[in-house]
Image: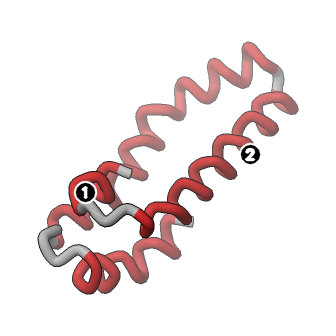
Amino acid sequence: MILLVVSFLPAYLEENYPTLTTSDGAHMIASFSIASIIFAPINGIIKNYMGAKNAIIFGFTMLTLSTAGIGFAPIVKDPVLFKWI
């Protein structure tokens, strides 16, 4: 999913949020990798606690909610709020 966002994010930010810089776009993209590093051990703990099947269902649920959130992000017109979403 991040590869799809990376391809159009710079042009989208330039067109819709001119106050956000390329550094802001880079921070948005880098946050995905940082979150992966931080939450990988936590995911292992969740898998051990809940079991593999329940952890996968939980993961798909979280992925669906976050994807829907990203889909609704263009509704936000405030550049700072968009950056944090």
Measured as percent of width and height from the top left, residue 85 is found at 38, 51
User: With respect to residue 18, does 44 lie above or below?
Assistant: above
Q: Are marks 2 and 1 in contact (CB under 8 Å)?
A: no
Of pointers 2 and 1, the one earlier in the residue sequence: 1
Measured as percent of width and height from the top left, residue 76 is found at 37, 62
User: With respect to residue 59, does 65 lie above or below?
Assistant: below
Camera-nearest residue between 11 and 56: 11
Q: Quadrant of the N terminus?
A: bottom right
Res 42 → quadrant = top right
Measured as percent of width and height from the top left, residue 20 is found at 16, 68
Q: Residues within 10 Å of mark 2 (few under 14, many from 20)?
A: few
Secondary structure of the residue carrying numbered label 1: helix
Q: Is residue 50 left or right of residue 8?
A: right
At 35% across and 61% down in the image, what residue appears? 29
Measured as percent of width and height from the top left, residue 80 is found at 22, 55
Q: Residues within 10 Å of mark 1 (few under 14, many from 20)?
A: some
Query: How does the figure colour the protein chain or chains?
Result: secondary structure
At 25% across and 66% down in the image, what residue appears? 25
User: With respect to residue 64, does 17 lie above or below?
Assistant: below
Three-letter amino acid code at disc 2? Phe
Q: Is residue 80 left or right of residue 28?
A: left
Pointer 2 residue: 60
Pointer 1 residue: 27
Q: Is residue 49 left or right of residue 72?
A: right
Of all residues, the one furthest to the top in this rendering is: 49
Of all residues, the one furthest to the right in this rendering is: 53
Circle number at residue 61: none
At 46% across and 72% down in the image, what residue appears? 5
At 60% across and 57% down in the image, what residue appears? 67
Camera-nearest residue between 64 and 53: 64
| Marks 2 and 1, how far apart at CA | 25 Å
Res 27 → quadrant = bottom left
